[in-house]
Amino acid sequence: MERKSASDYPQELLDLFHEYQHGDIDRRTFLDRAGKFAVGGLTVAAIFEGLQPNYAWAQQVPPDDKRIKVGYETVQSPAGNGSIKGYLARPSKGKKWPAVLVIHENRGLNPYVEDVARRLALQNFVAFAPDGLTSVGGYPGNDEKGAALFREVDGKKMTEDFVAAARWLKARPDSTGKLGAVGFCFGGGMVNQLAVRLGPDLNAGAAFYGRQAGADDVPKIAAPLLLHYAGNDQRVNEGIPAYEAALKANKKTYAVYMYDGKQHGFHNDTTPRYDAEAAKLAWTRTLEFFNKYLR
């Protein structure tokens, strides 16, 4: 499939697909409303296909890279859904590393998120990417089905699953005990929630275009926060002013970066919303942030 970028699509169409991906409209409604963009021999089906992820584009670090070790682990989560399965990646040399929890978008543990875990392992972190869909059978191998399953999971129990995974990762014998969390979309919001829930047990949180924690919960946050936002992401961005005001009022350590003109999901290199320049800059900032607070 030819790789396209966000600039190849009208903003209205990208916004429409964003609504579909987040469950605000169903597939039929998306296809009906996308019909007006099907011109010049381009079909609605081709538009839909072009906006879907291509996982081959995301593989920056092959699973068999000799510099890392990867595998799946299951974490007990008695307060959540009983257990949560996830993808563990760590350097092949050394004994202890800072730990980073990697939290997926609202579609489960797809190949892009597993690759992010491997990227962290190459940077000398032990990374664990849990699958919030574990209780409904796990990521189904397809983002569209993953998004549908995501809406079936009990949200409160899923939060407990991520809390359990974070505590398990921090306590692992190959962890230094320093814990970071990075998340995207839903996962970015979960990073903010974990900062509230874990307090001083979280040492650094990096959230990509994630929903903010409530202002009343901000006093519970102890971790420094790195908050990445996309300029074309009105629904998420409307929560920034109140969150930033609360972080400032409570003297929290945080940094906000706005990537002007970029789309929600700009770090995800499997879709047209990906922006290589913004993704590289945000990722560089994230690694610098983790190296500062987790080493």
Image (spheres, grey):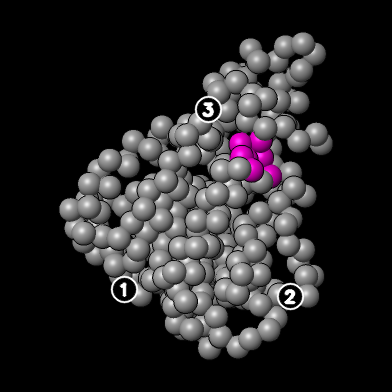
Which circle's residue, 2 or 3, is located before the other in the chain? 3
- Sequence-first disc among 1 and 2: 2
Q: Amino acid at mark 3?
A: Asp
Question: Which amino acid, by three-letter code, is at mark 1?
Answer: Pro
Left or right placement of residue 162 versus residue 11 in this view: left
User: Callout 2: few (<14), some (14-19), or many (20+) C-alpha neighbours within 10 Å?
Assistant: some
Is residue 178 highlighted in magenta? no
What's the CA distance linking mark 1 and mark 3?
37 Å
The amino acid type of the residue labelled 2 equals: Arg
Q: Secondary structure at mark 2?
A: loop
Q: Residues within 10 Å of mark 1 (few under 14, many from 20)?
A: some
Q: Which residues fall within the magenta stretch? A: 270-276
Crowding near the residue tagged with mark 3, few <14, some 14–19, many ≥20 C-alpha atoms within 10 Å: some
Query: Along the line of sight, which residue is nearer the eye, 164 or 128?
Result: 128
Q: Secondary structure at mark 3?
A: helix
Q: Tell which of 76 and 221 is nearer to you.
A: 221
Q: As rendered, which of 44 and 205 lies closer to the eye? A: 205
Q: Are marks 1 and 2 in contact (CB under 8 Å)?
A: no
Choose the circle earlier in sequence order: 1 or 3: 3
The answer to whether 139 appears left or right of 195 in the picture is right
Q: Which residue is mark 1?
A: 200
* Residue at image location 32% in from the left, 40% down from the top: 239
Q: Which residue is mark 2?
A: 67
Q: What residue appears at the point 52 percent right and 82 percent down from the top-left corner?
A: 175
Residue located beneath label 3 in the image: 15
Residue 108 percent coordinates (x, y): 59, 54
